[in-house]
Amino acid sequence: MNTPLVRMHGIHKSFGPVKVLEGVDFELLPGEVHALMGENGAGKSTLMKILTGIHAPDAGGIEVDGKAVTIATPADAEKYGIAIIHQELNLIPSLSVADNLFLGREVHRFGLLDRRAMKRRATEWLARVGMERLDPGTLVERLSVGQQQMVEIARALGQEARVLIMDEPTAALTEHETATLFKLIRELREQGKGIVYVSHRMEEIFAVCDRISVLRDGQFVGTRPIPGLGFDEVVKMMVGRTLDTRYPARTPKIGEVRLKAEHIGGGPVHDVSFELHAGEVLGVAGLLGAGRTELARLIFGLDRRSSGKVTLDGVEVTPKSPSEAIHAGFGFVTEDRKAQGLVLDLSLRENVSLPRVPAHAGLVDRPAEKRQTRGLIDALKIRTRDMELEARSLSGGNQQKVVLAKWLALKPRVLILDEPTRGVDVGGKAEIYHIINQLAEQGVAILMISSELPEVLAMSDRILVMHEGRATALLDAHGATQEAVMTAATGGK
Amino acid sequence: MTLHFDRSRATTLLQRLGSVIGLVLLFIVLSIMSPDFLTTGNLLTVLRQVSINALIAFGMTFVILAGGIDLSVGAILALTGAVTAGLMAAGHGMLLAASAGLGLGLVLGIVNGALVSWGRVAPFIATLGTMTLLRGLTLSYTQGSPIPVTNTGFALIGGGYVAHLIPLPVIWMFAAFLVCGFLLRGTVFGRHVMAIGGNEEAARLSGVRISPMKLAIYGLSGLLSACAGIVLTSRLYSAQATAGAGYELDAIAAVVLGGTSLSGGRGWLFGTLVGALLIGFLNNGLNLLGVSSFYQQVVKGIVILIAVLLDRRQ
């Protein structure tokens, strides 16, 4: 039996109170393409960051070629021949291919660059990834994404990498580029390199990988050889998260069609249509990069639609800015509350009233503003002594409630929630679910984007599943299973 | 957690009061070291000198709070002063001349705002460009020689006194402080200024209309620079093309000394007033103590650096 190139065993990692990895094992053989799968937040990237020396594990060990090693820095990882090809490529666009290949390890004589030697060696390295025809003097910004990725791989190989971690390598590639990449991956496998292939795309994993390991909520589910493995079995390994949060019940009172989206397209989103009724919660499920947030931004007028039509209560609306969307009756709780939801330096009160400050002729009506804030603090059970505290000082759950409060003050007709419970503790989640249910009961139409399958299943009336910018399924939430959603989200039928 | 909140609030308060404490200390030290310092005449003279910088710095506070910068304030001061004086020299009344000057300042500020918002030019570059351009326009308008003011009514704006004691520019300064302070704290406009500086993306997503706001913010800065231009022209009985050179830096210094963060979103107008007074009294004190003007600059620079270094230790 081959000695594994890399073996990680019993890896534990916590960030503060949050356990991200709990006893994960992973092994990579020479000449193997090993898929690493799991839902968003399952711990894949943390595991790979530990392998590349960005994070240190709390417990567990790593072996390279059967010898226990410590990988404390990215430089250690490089020393052991472990390289990662990032999803966002790590090249400097304004420098040439050769400059990028030798960045940080330039060939020089007494501080003077030896350009001729670098160019010669760059050509050799590029030949290894089938790019011998590329002039090393070309600026990286002139290359396609696929070519840039090849340059990154060439750099890793040039540094004698034997373990290549590829994080969603095909996310930005054309079909032709993907085929070229797969060809290269197969060649590298022949040469005895080990490749960790992180991806959400089931077809690709079946096309190119030898084995698959699945993580779920930081737990190691198992490793299986791909030949003989069925699509359903992989899905089954990925889902089946235990329902640790109690979801409050709601009696749906579904009203008239409120929002009608027809053939929405723009950016990564292609031809998405759906109807959203008053009093309905429509869940939007999908994996990272499926285009869910982008869909919400197109509807809210943050990005320009290239096609499609949105009708609100029978009237066509094309908001060109958030301010027009808000005026039309939309509210949008964004995914990243610190970057997009809150002004952290302003007080809770000032944040809550930001979309519409209670005022007469431009003069702030402070008493009315305080009354409004007090009312929302009580209604949403925001735990704070003082509405004058900076938003920065609140806990994650309370911050999220402030963002919700901001929109509730406007009484929107359609409320878009993007990952409404991300980074919120279990207690806070339950309260946010309760608020969502109350809003739905008041007749607000809710579009809820969420990466947590149990949450989508429990909270929604219907579920829109997206994959690669397209709607792949529209399911009735009652009777839908995690497997059904995950199958549609990974592009299966 | 409770402890943490209190500490963060206490730190904020201390930071804010830092400039006030600095001003009080400076006052005490100068009173002891120079017998001429703590006299009504001297203090009012300093206040009058400070008023020009303070007017500009109030506008600058809005710009900086919203996350921008305005380098063109000194150039706007010069051009509006020249146009006002030029119109009076051409036989127009002071009311028309002053209104034209103020209107011009407002429009020039709005042009800055348009470059920054619609043109997406970085504020530093946009206002550096308009600064240079306006300086050139002022030089060609005045042909490089001062435009004298003969209108005695106009001369009162910068040279008059209330009750034979308080210089009128001091009154303008405090009036502008009250109006701007209210604008910042009591109006939706002010709230949106703070929100844009704190997190422009969040403000935009909350429906704050960023571009019109920026036009208004830079417009306000231009208007206040024009006010300063008129006061200065009146006080000197003439408009000069080189007037206000370097005033943008004094205004920025006053804002920063007052504890307003250059990255926007945090700060207050009272701090700017204190910052302007600090600079004024520092200059005055160093003069009274007979420190050479070369070293005065050194001291001013050191004070600014210390203030900013203290501010960074949040």
Image (cartoon, helix red, strand yellow):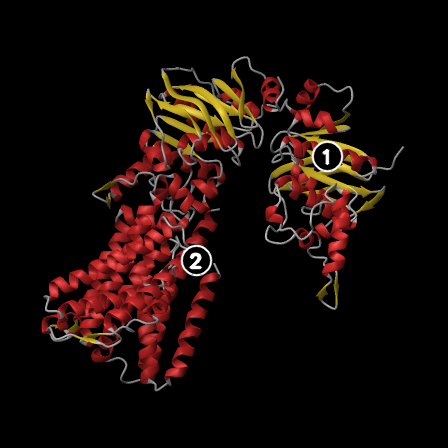
Q: Secondary structure at mark 1?
A: strand
Q: Which mark is residue A435?
A: none
Q: Which mark is residue B11?
A: 2
Is residue A196 found left or right of B46 in the rendered image? right
Q: Chain of mark 2?
A: B
Q: Around disc 1, counting alpha carbons within 10 Å, would you say few (fewer than 14), some (14 to 19), or many (20 or more)?
A: many
The three-letter code of the residue at mark 1 reads Val
Q: Residue at x 25, y 61 (%)?
A: B224
Q: Same chain, marks 1 and 2?
A: no
Q: Quadrant of the C terminus of chain A?
A: top right
- Judge whether B187 appears above or below A307 on screen: below
Q: Nearer the viewer, residue B199 or A440?
A: B199
Q: Point out the frontmost of discs 1 and 2.
A: 1
State the image coordinates of residue B158 (x, y, percent, origin top left).
Answer: 18, 71
Q: Chain of mark 1?
A: A
Q: Secondary structure at mark 2?
A: helix
Gap in Å between the C-alphas at discs 1 and 2? 44 Å
Would you say residue A490 is visible in this rendering?
yes
Q: Residue at x 26, y 79 (%)?
A: B38
